[in-house]
């Protein structure tokens, strides 16, 4: 009986332990310094100039993404839409990054792990 109860509660427990809160703001960093902190409810595109050129960031419907970047491998563009607090995308060659934070601030520093 106890085993059956644990099996039924497992999905709820897993969700409770691993779920991240919804993000409310995005922090944009350029060359390690805070460039901007924006509300995720705003609808906008922003170009951030780095050593290789412009990194274009889009904010829409409570989520954000890096649309384009002059870096050769495009890892930050492939990260896609981000919406959970603690998520980040880093364009290392262009020294640009974005980090999502919730109402209570970041649970951990995602840029210094």
Image: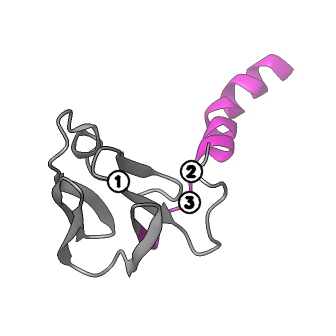
Along the line of sight, the residue nearer the viewer: 35 or 67:
35
How many discs appear? Answer: 3
Residue position marked by numbered label 3 in the rendering: 21
Q: Is residue 106 left or right of residue 32?
A: right
- Marks 2, 3: nearer the viewer: 2
Residue 103 position in % (x across, y down): 58, 75
Image side of residue 5 versus residue 109, left or right: right
The answer to whether one can see residue 17 in this image is yes
**Camera-nearest label, 2 or 1:** 1
Dot 1: element = loop
| Left or right placement of residue 39 versus residue 12 in this view | left
The quadrant holding residue 102 is: bottom right
**On screen, 53 above or below 2?**
below
Instruction: Tell me residue 56's x, y (percent).
Output: 17, 62
Identify residue for label 1: 95
Residue identified by numbered label 2: 110
Judging depth in this view, the residue of 79 and 48 nearest the camera is 48
Q: Does residue 23 belong to the magenta stretch?
A: yes
What is the span of residues highlighted in magenta in the rendered image?
Answer: 1-27
Mark 2–mark 3 CB contact (< 8 Å): no
The residue under the point 38% across, 80% down is 39
Q: In the rendering, at what x and y percent does residue 46 appear?
A: 20, 73
Q: Quadrant of residue 59?
A: bottom left
Q: Is residue 46 above or below residue 11?
A: below
Residue in the picture at 21% in, 66% down: 49
Badge 2 density bin: few <14, some 14–19, many ≥20, Cα 10 Å: few
Examine the image and state in which quarter residue 113 appears: top right
Secondary-structure class at tag 2: loop
Main secondary structure along the magenta-highlighted residues:
helix
Residue 34 shows which numbered tag? none
């Amino acid at each position: 009986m106890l085993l059956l109860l644990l099996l039924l509660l497992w999905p709820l427990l897993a969700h409770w332990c691993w779920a991240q809160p919804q993000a409310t703001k995005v922090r944009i960093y350029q060359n390690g310094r805070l460039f901007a902190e924006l509300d995720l409810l705003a609808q906008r595109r922003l170009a951030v100039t780095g050593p290789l050129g412009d990194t274009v960031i889009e904010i829409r419907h409570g989520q954000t993404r890096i649309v384009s970047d002059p870096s050769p491998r495009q890892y930050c563009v492939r990260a896609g839409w981000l919406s959970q607090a603690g998520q980040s995308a880093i364009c290392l060659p262009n020294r640009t990054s974005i980090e999502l934070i919730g109402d209570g601030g970041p649970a951990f520093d995602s840029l210094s792990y």
